Image (cartoon, rainbow, N blue to C red):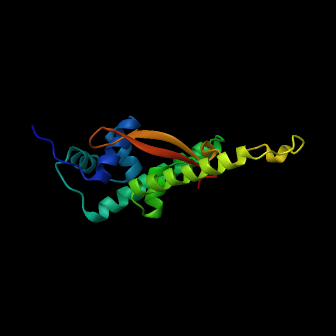
Amino acid sequence: MRTKKLNSTIAMLKEYKESNRITYEELSHQTGYNTGTLNSWINGTVKPLPESLKAVEQFLNRVYASKFVDIAEANKTYIDSRLVAQWTGKAHKDLLEDIRGYIENLKQSQAKTLGRKFPPYDKSRSINVFKPQYYFIESHYTHPINKRKMPCYLITQKGC
C-alpha cells in the first residue's frame, strides 16, 4: 500500500503525537479536533482545510513555546532554532546560515581577545564573553517526513 505524502504541519503533529506517546484521544483533548479527524489527517486519507492547518500550527507553536518556558524555568534557557525561524518568518536553512556566521564572528572575536595580554589582577577581563557555546549549541532533530537527521541549534538567552 502506498502512503500519501503528509503536509509538513500534519507531519509535525504526527511527530508530536509519537514523540510524546499520546493517544488520539489525548491529542483530541489538546487540539480540540475529534479523534476521527486527527486520525484521517495523520494517516493521509483526508487533507485538512487551510483554517485547520493554521489552527494546528498555532497549537504546535504554543506547545513548543511552553516547552521553552519549562526549560527556561529549569535554568537551562535554550530555544530550538526551528521555533525561532517560525517566529521570525525566516526559512530554517537561512537562519542556520546566519547562526553559523555569528559563530564564526564570535570565534574571530574570541581569538582577538585571547591574543591580548591583560594584567592578572583584572579578573573582569579574564572571562571571555565570545565563546560560541554561550550563545549557540549545535544539535539535531529527526525530520518528520524523511526521517533523516537534520541540523539545528539550541539558542541560549544570550543568543536570542
Image quadrant where one finds the N terminus:
top left
User: Residue at 41% across / 59% down in the picture?
Assistant: 58
Q: Is residue 94 left or right of residue 5?
A: right
Q: Nearer the viewer, residue 16 or 75?
A: 75
In the image shown, does 47 or 112 lie closer to the viewer? 112
Closest to the observer, 19 or 116: 116
> Of all residues shown, which one is farthest toward the left?
1
Q: Is residue 34 visible?
A: no
Residue 82 left/right relative to 14: right
Identify the residue at horizontal 36%, vertical 60% (top origin): 55
- Image coords of residue 89 (percent x, y): 42, 64
Q: Nearer the viewer, residue 117 or 72?
A: 117
Above or below, comparing residue 148 to residue 28 in the picture: above
* Number of numbered discs visible in the structure rendering: 0
Q: Can residue 8 be seen in the rendering of this structure? A: yes
Q: Position of residue 66 (x, y in %)?
A: 53, 49
> Which residue is depicted at the point 90% across and 42% down?
121
Q: Quadrant of the C terminus?
A: bottom right
The reply, left or right, for residue 47 in relation to residue 113 is left
Question: Going 21% across and 48% down the picture, which residue do you hit?
Answer: 40
Q: Position of residue 26 (x, y in %)?
A: 38, 42
Work out which residue is located at the far top of the displayed protein and give it.
Answer: 21
Q: Quadrant of residue 97?
A: bottom left
